[in-house]
Image (cartoon, rainbow, N blue to C red):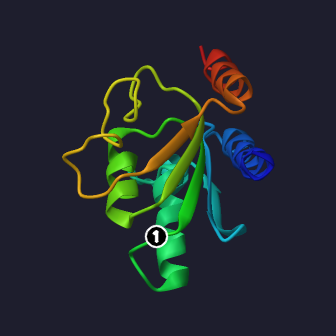
Amino acid sequence: MADDLHFLQLALDEARASAAGGEVPIGAVLVQDDAVLARSGNRTIRDNDPTAHAEIVVIREAARLLRNYRLSGTVLYVTLEPCAMCAGAIVQARVSRLVYAADDPKGGAFRSCFELLSSPKLNHQVEVNFGLLAEESALLLQSFFGSRR
C-alpha cells in the first residue's frame, strides 16, 4: 500500500504538470521491480496525437526502453480509470497490475462504462486496484474543467 501511494502520487505530479501545460490532467507511471520505467501526463494537444493518453505514452516508452512489447511484471499507476483504448493497450502489453485513483463515469473501461479489463473473454487478465487518492485526482480534474467553463 505504501508503494502504491508513492507511485500514485508521482502520477498525480504528472497530472498536475499536464494541467499546467493545458492538457487534461491525467498522469501515469509504469513500474517494474519498484523502479520507475516511464512517467508522463497526457500529451494529446502537445503531440497533436489523439492516442497520446498518459497510459499509452508510458507503455510506449517502457516498451522502447525494455526492447520488448510485452511488459509482464509491470504495474501501471494512473490517476483516472483508463478508457477503452488504454485498456486495450494494457491488455496487449500484458501489464500485470493496474492501480488507478478515480473512476471515470463517462469513459472508464474497467467498471464505470465498460468492463474490458475484467472480461474472461480476453487472453490476458489484469489485476486491478482502485480508489487510492481518488478524491485528490477527481478534484484536480474538476478544477481543470471548471476553470475552462
**What residue sits right under mark 1 in the picture?**
72
| Other-residue count near label 1 (Cα within 10 Å), few / some / many at <14 / 14–19 / ≥20 | few
Q: Amino acid at mark 1?
A: Ser
Residue at horizontal 65%, vertical 60%? 39
Give percent across and percent down for residue 53.
48, 49
Furthest residue in direction bottom, as rendered: 67
- Going by the picture, which residue comes out furthest to the left? 121
Q: Which residue is located at x 53 percent, y 71 percent?
A: 61
Which residue lies at the image location 32% right of the left edge and 33% below the top edge? 115
Q: Who's the residue at 65% across and 15% down the image?
A: 146
Image vertical order of residue 107 relative to residue 149, above or below: below
- Classify residue 136 by image quadrant: top right
Q: How many marks?
A: 1
- Work out whether 38 lies above or below 142: below
23 sits to left or right of 13: left
- Position of 91 relative to 128 (above/below): below
Instruction: Give the side of residue 31 with respect to residue 109, left or right.
Output: right
Label 1: state its secondary structure: loop
